[in-house]
Image: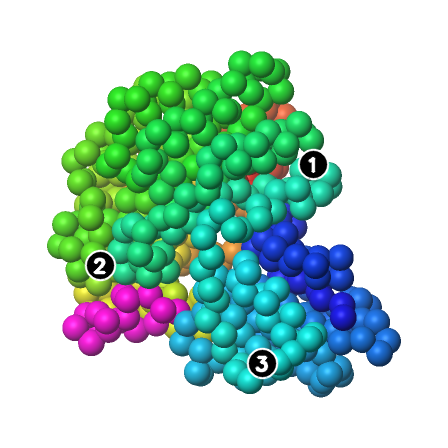
Amino acid sequence: MTILLTTLNARYAHASLGLRYLLANMGELQEQTKIHEFVIGARSTDVVEKILAYRQPEQKFIVGFGVYIWNVVEITQIVAILKRVAPEVIIILGGPEVSHETGDQEIIRLADYVITGWGDISFANLCQQILRGPQPLMKIHAGLQPPMNDIRLPYQLYSDQDIRHRTLYVEASRGCPFKCEFCLSSLDKTAWPFDIDVFLAEMESLYQRGARLFKFVDRTFNLNIKTSLKIMQFFLDKLAAAPDDPVFAHFEVVPDHLPDALKEGIQKFPAGTLQFEIGIQSFNPEVQSLISRKQNNDKAAENIRWLCEHSHAHLHVDLIAGLPGETMQSFAAGFNKLVALGPHEIQFGILKRLRGTPVIRHTDAFGLVFDPQPPYTILANKDVPFADMQKLVRFARYWDMVANSGRFANTLPVILADAPFENFLAFSDWIYTSTDATHRIALDRLAGLVSKWLQEERGMEREAALALVSSDYAGDAKHKQSSSKPAAEKTTAKATPQRQSRHIAA
């Protein structure tokens, strides 16, 4: 038997942690198992050809696919081609996109077997049954959740190439105790930690091999403060020992749980070494109640402000538009409140109906309408009609281009002024009317458009608008806009800010 573990990552820099968990727990089948990762956008026939190159004559060939919201469409095409050109290949699916609502999915119809939920141990067991019998009778297999100590950690399977060129995903725990209905983690009963000493020994091994970028996928890094402090101390020790060769750690944190002991540790991290992803999602208490999200908004705001003012941590804070009960006005109020707190980036997300999440229970009461195709983005609800939702989608795209890119640091406050949401929405509507595009707007053209909007919509003098945009557009004299020619004729792309160039995949 030959077993191939594969998936399509969103980009090359994303190394699949899930596939490596499967390989680490294959037991006696590990020597017969290989990993081959692809990237979305690859030609389906090319992927199939490379998969079939692993097939050995006269042997069973199993292909296990990791299926996610971003790759399900392409993997469905790949599986369909595989089954046409090599119907004898045994296809096993796993991953969040095939773990719920399995009855109506074409990819599941095409596959031989599906493992829902935890696959760490169940995948190897299923392969053993296929190899030695008794042959499995059911297509859908509920993955068994083993004790955490029974799961072999996969970090030694990160290759030297991975360490040099890719984001290393790690986890000190799985699951989440919170029940936010838009999130798949709401289906978890709690969070389950790995043995912290065993985990840190694995991190030490990665560090000794040259790893310097660690992205934690734990849903609630600061849930257990004792464990959080132990992990943070690991990185602080590395920074103290080699300040000229710094590590960088990314954590997802609960916004309203930041005790003094954790603050003290956070303050010790120098600039460029620590990033927090903070899920606010909504500041509207009624919306929070509807979606079963427990959050002390005052404490969350206080903590974000403290992190901005008293730490060097880079803050990436999330808001979600389209939640049931959230109007344009209430979302605007939450957005403006968050801007005033001063995080480095605001990730403006649009609600998606992930398979299996309880948010669907609000469909009738709030008129939720979702795109039937992945990523199942909300199209409208009773409070935000389709046309307004489209405006929010464009707002999110332009916000990434102008605000989160870091390329318009001096210009952005002028755009936002005293009404950030309202003013940026006006800018977003104007730029869409002017370009009919939300993608592939070259940086030089974007800078020219920003300058033009300041002049036409804000009444700014041309010289002042050009000088403002030039002050941060390129950060280099040779790239600054000249007032003697239109902006778009003289501008070139600014280098990506240092933090983003190092940690863009984090």
Q: Residue 406, percent across and down?
A: 47, 34
Question: Secondary structure under badge 1?
Answer: helix
Instruction: Compare marks 2 and 3 and give the one earlier in the sequence.
Output: 3
Amino acid residing under circle 1: Arg
The correct choice, above or below, for 108 with respect to 51 in the image is: below
Q: Quadrant of residue 94?
A: bottom right
- Residue closer to the observer: 432 or 377: 377
How crowded pointer 2 is (Cα within 10 Å; few <14, some 14-19, many 20+) is rated as: many
Q: CA distance from mark 2 to mark 3?
A: 39 Å
Using the rendered image of the protein, determine whether residue 42 is visible from the camera's viewpoint: yes
Instruction: Compare marks 2 and 1 and give the one earlier in the sequence.
Output: 1
In the drawing, does residue 462 fall left or right of residue 243? left
Question: Which residue is located at x 36 percent, y 69 percent?
Answer: 356
Q: State the extent of the magenta-drawn residues as a range.
A: 355-370
Q: Which residue is mark 1?
A: 164
* Residue mark closest to the camera, 3 vs 1: 3
Question: Which residue is located at x 15 percent, y 55 percent?
Answer: 289
Residue 326 lies in magenta, yes or no? no
Question: Which residue is located at x 43 percent, y 27 percent?
Answer: 230
Q: How many marks?
A: 3
In the drawing, does residue 127 fall left or right of residue 503? right
Q: Quadrant of residue 429?
A: bottom left
